[in-house]
Amino acid sequence: MKILVLGAGVIGVTTAHALSRLGHEVLVIDQADGVASQASHANGAQLAYSYVDPFANFATLKKIPKYMLGFDEGIRLRFTNKFSYYAWGLEFIRHCTSKKAAANMQVMLELAHTSKQAMSKIYSEIPAVAIRVHGAGKIVLAGTPQELEKLNASVALKKSYGFDVEILDKDSCILQEPGLGSWQGEFCGGIYAPGDKVLDPLVFCQTIQAHSESKYGVGYYFGHTILKLKQKNNKITQVQTDKDIFNCDAAIVCLGEGANNIIKTIDKAYPVYPMRGYSLTLDTGKEVTKTSITDPISKIVFSNLGGKIRIAGFLDANIPETKIDERGRALLATAQKLWPSIANYDGEANFWTGLRPMTPSGIPIVKKSKINGLYYNIGHGSLGLTLAAGSAQRIAQLIEGVRKNTGSVIPEDKHEFAQ
């Protein structure tokens, strides 16, 4: 089949690789001049399979007024005149019940498990040294005994999905990651996942692109602004850009926050809203962390990329462009206050910001559309790198099921991760 993949971020390149590996003719189209130019470019660099906990939960619900009034440094949810924001917010609130959050957690863990297995297949084909993956492990800190108890409540569920996780007290956290001895924030312990990893998303996307081009003949078309999708007799037939028209047997929308602009040319819009995130990449400091650290209170992650420290975090909705640099400075100040010895804060700090496409439930939309040959792989939020390989495998299985005229490889309700 001739398949068009729309978008060359981490979701798009992994989807193209998975499909080309099955023998399809695959073309990737993106308006940028290279892979991973937007939300995938310099994110938190986390393969956090054990920590895909949905943001929509009862604890978050109670904090929404604080987020909207600017009383939390890590999350700013500003008012806007966009109806889609409030519609998204109402749907988000619906997912904040304990029952919904628990069900969403299970769906996310299933996809994370699939993604971890799918990434192992990629490692078998492309050496980990080429992708520069670090087997660092991950610690999610808990500031209080109550927070540690909340983390502990999810351990049994995560273990049931095959994830190696354990609760550590403060001394055990420092024993595992000695650099935490200089941590200036409050913490009493954390959840440790030795199987989670760190991976530079830009290097990963560039490596997958090069491999899929050379081995499988995947074509990449950059500098093409996608204008519309075209159908005939309820079957996707073409994708039109500002430079050309591409014929196809199937198309997969793997675009980020702007996915609905394209989807609406042929189908209904989906509940995906752009939430801004930030990162800083600095030289390492006096301490050299071997384990990635997440501080949920400050909404910050620290990852060692090998000679560089990636500090990522914060979540903003509807922030004005004039406030972006200010938020970058706030991230730097918060990181330096928490862990002053982990990075060279006086050196050059490469600042990045991007819009993360989030669904209200946190579950990405990975499904067939009502139009034959059209598929969606969107809405991964801050977990794009973690869930990319699994989402790509799901799409490939869906397409293979249709091609073999079996409807689907596994039952549809288990196969389609959607709202």
Image (cartoon, rainbow, N blue to C red):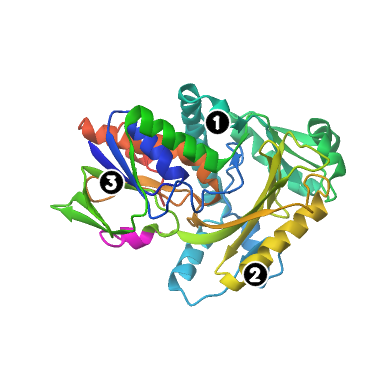
Q: Mark 1 vs mark 3: give the one in front.
A: 3
Question: How many other residues sit within 10 Å of disc 1, few (<14), some (14-19) or many (≥20)?
Answer: some
Q: Residue furthest left?
A: 233
Asked if one can make out residue 263 in the rendered structure from this viewpoint, the answer is yes
Find residue 302 and report its horizontal and vertical position in percent.
70, 45
Callout 3: few (<14), some (14-19), or many (20+) C-alpha neighbours within 10 Å? many
Q: Which mark is residue 65?
A: 2
Which mark identifies residue 374?
Answer: none
Provide the residue designation for mark 3.
Answer: 251
Gap between marks 1 and 3 measured at Cα: 32 Å
Residue at coordinates 78% horizontally, 37% vertically from top-left? Answer: 288
Using the image, determine if residue 166 lies above or below residue 53: above
Left or right, residue 294 beside residue 366: right
Residue topped by disc 1: 161
**Horizontal and vertical percent for residue 78?**
59, 71
User: Is the stretch drawn in magenta largely helix, strand or loop?
Assistant: loop
In terms of sequence position, does the residue under pointer 2 or pointer 3 come before the other? 2
Q: Amino acid at mark 2?
A: Pro
- Contact? badges 1 and 2 (CB < 8 Å): no
SS at circle 3: strand
Identify the secondary structure beneath mark 1: loop
Q: Nearer the viewer, mark 2 or mark 3?
A: 3
**Residue numbers of the magenta segment:** 260-270
Q: Residue furthest bottom?
A: 81
Q: Where residue 308 sits in the image (x, y, percent)? A: 69, 41
341 drawn magenta: no
List x then y, in percent, for residue 348.
Answer: 72, 53
Question: As shown in the figure, which amino acid type bears the numbered disc 3?
Answer: Ala
User: Is 268 covered by the magenta stretch?
Assistant: yes
Q: Is residue 103 visible?
A: no
Left or right of 380, for residue 406: left
